[in-house]
Structure formats: structure tokens, C-alpha cells
Image (cartoon, rainbow, N blue to C red):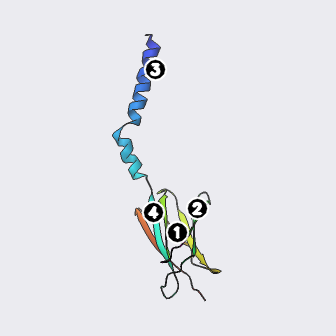
Amino acid sequence: MRKYQVVALVVLFLGVAAGASPYSKDKDKETAGRMLTGKVLDRHDNPLPDAIVYLANVRTRAVKSYITAADGAYHFPELSPNIDYEVYAQYKGQKSDTKTVSQFDDRKIVNIVLHIDVK
């Protein structure tokens, strides 16, 4: 083999070995994300089924939505830990306050209860 072919094979081998490193799996676990959970409740703490929860990525302004279950619960899995999010809910024309999920909040599971004053 020629010298440059040997060098190319060594570089290729090192690249494959680095990709299979056990350290890369640990890093994936660290950046796997976090989860936002919570409930949408009325002023008497009764669940609001079929409320729509909106989650906005503050950086890109991309919005995801979730329709609450019978118990008013919602969840957004696999959120980036390096981005701020805003979350709010709407139910029958009424809107909750907007809450922020900060990138500086290092909890893996963030729980936010949203209240809507239903008339």
C-alpha cells in the first residue's frame, strides 16, 4: 500500500472508533432533553378536558399544541435543554397566563399547572 492509502485508512478507522465511543452515549443521555408536564384547571381546581395547550419555542417561534385529557393533563416530551419555551392554554375562548420554561431550569421534568378563569 502506498503511504497516503495507509494514512487514509488510519483516519477512517479513528473516525469510526470515535463514533462508537462509550462517551458519546453518555453525552446523548445528557442532551436527551426534558419533559414538560402539567394540568389545565379552572379557578376551583377542576380539570378542563379538551383545553388546548400551546408550547412556543422562544428562539424559532415554532409552536406545538396538545389537547388535554379528561383529567386536564398534558405533556411535551424531549424538549431541548438549551432553549426557552413559553406555554399557555385556551379553553372556550378564555386564555391562561403564559408561563416560561427557562433553559436555566435544570430539572428533567418540569411541571406547570395552568389556570383558566372559565365563566
Q: Does the CB distance between marks 2 and 4 fall below 8 Å?
A: no
Q: Does the rendering let one see residue 83? A: yes
Q: Is residue 69 magenta?
A: yes
Tell me the amino acid under the disc marked 2. Val
Disc 1: which residue: 100
Q: Residues within 10 Å of mark 2 (few under 14, many from 20)?
A: some
Disc 3: which residue: 8
Looking at the rendering, the stretch of residues picked out in magenta corresponds to 67-71
* Residue 78 percent across, percent down from the top left: 47, 57
User: Judging from the image, what secondary structure is the residue with disc 4 in?
Assistant: strand
Tell me which corner region of the image, top left, top right, bottom left or bottom right, holds residue 24: top left
* Residue 99 percent across, percent down from the top left: 53, 72
Looking at the image, tell me whether mark 2 or mark 4 is earlier in sequence order: 4
Q: Is residue 59 magenta?
A: no
Looking at the image, tell me whether mark 1 or mark 4 is earlier in sequence order: 4
Q: Does the CB distance between marks 4 and 3 fall below 8 Å?
A: no
Tell me which corner region of the image, top left, top right, bottom left or bottom right, holds residue 18: top left
Say which residue appears at 41% left-offset and 22% top-offset.
10
Looking at the image, tell me whether mark 2 or mark 3 is earlier in sequence order: 3
Judge from the rendering whether residue 30 lies leftward or rightward of residue 82; answer left or right.
left
Disc 4: which residue: 35
Disc 1 from disc 2: Cα separation:
9 Å
Looking at the image, tell me whether mark 1 or mark 2 is earlier in sequence order: 2
Say which residue appears at 55% left-offset and 69% top-offset.
87
Tell me the amino acid under the disc marked 3. Ala
Disc 2: which residue: 58
Q: Residues within 10 Å of mark 3 (few under 14, many from 20)?
A: few
Disc 4 from disc 3: Cα separation:
43 Å
Tell me the amino acid under the disc marked 4. Met
* Residue 81 percent across, percent down from the top left: 46, 57
